Amino acid sequence: MKAKAKEKAFFLNMEQRELIEKSFKEICNARKYELLSVHARTNHVHAVISAAAKPESISNGLKSHATRKLRENYSILNDEKLWSRRRSQRYL
């Protein structure tokens, strides 16, 4: 992925990681998903969620909500990409 990247990597500081975790909790509560675990790292996020929805729909909602919160609270440009196009999703 790094070799194919067209933009520089976006790294999260501690406050941004906490904000992402909080935003994941908010969207899961709003959509009645069971958030079993979430951990934001400097360059990626892990979450384990139980829901009656497709993983693509869940991750798209999580990413869009977290992006909105980051842009509202930090000076991140609208054209600055925060997430990679692909994601790892596994059914457990």
Image: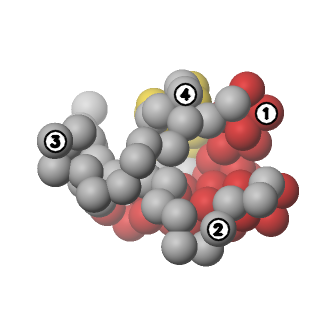
Frontmost of labels 4 and 2 is 2
Q: Secondary structure at mark 3?
A: loop
Residue 8 placed where, x, y %?
40, 47
Q: Which mark is residue 77?
A: 2
Q: Is residue 68 above or below residue 46?
A: below
Q: Residue at x 61, y 60 (%)?
A: 67
Category of crowding for the residue at label 2, using alpha-carbon neighbours closer than 10 angstroms: few (below 14), some (14–19), many (at least 20): few
Tell me: 62 left or right of 77. left
Category of crowding for the residue at label 3, using alpha-carbon neighbours closer than 10 angstroms: few (below 14), some (14–19), many (at least 20): few
Category of crowding for the residue at label 1, using alpha-carbon neighbours closer than 10 angstroms: few (below 14), some (14–19), many (at least 20): few
Q: Residue at x 25, y 51 (%)?
A: 5
- The residue at which mark 1 appears reads as 15
Name which residue type carries label 3: Ala
Give the CA distance from mark 3 to mark 1. Answer: 28 Å
Give the CA distance from mark 4 to mark 3. Answer: 19 Å
Name which residue type carries label 1: Glu
Which of the marked residues, 1 or 2, is nearer the chain's N terminus? 1
Which of the marked residues, 4 or 1, is nearer the chain's N terminus? 1
Name which residue type carries label 2: Leu
**Pointer 4 and pointer 3: residues touching (CB < 8 Å)?**
no
Quadrant location, the C terminus: top left
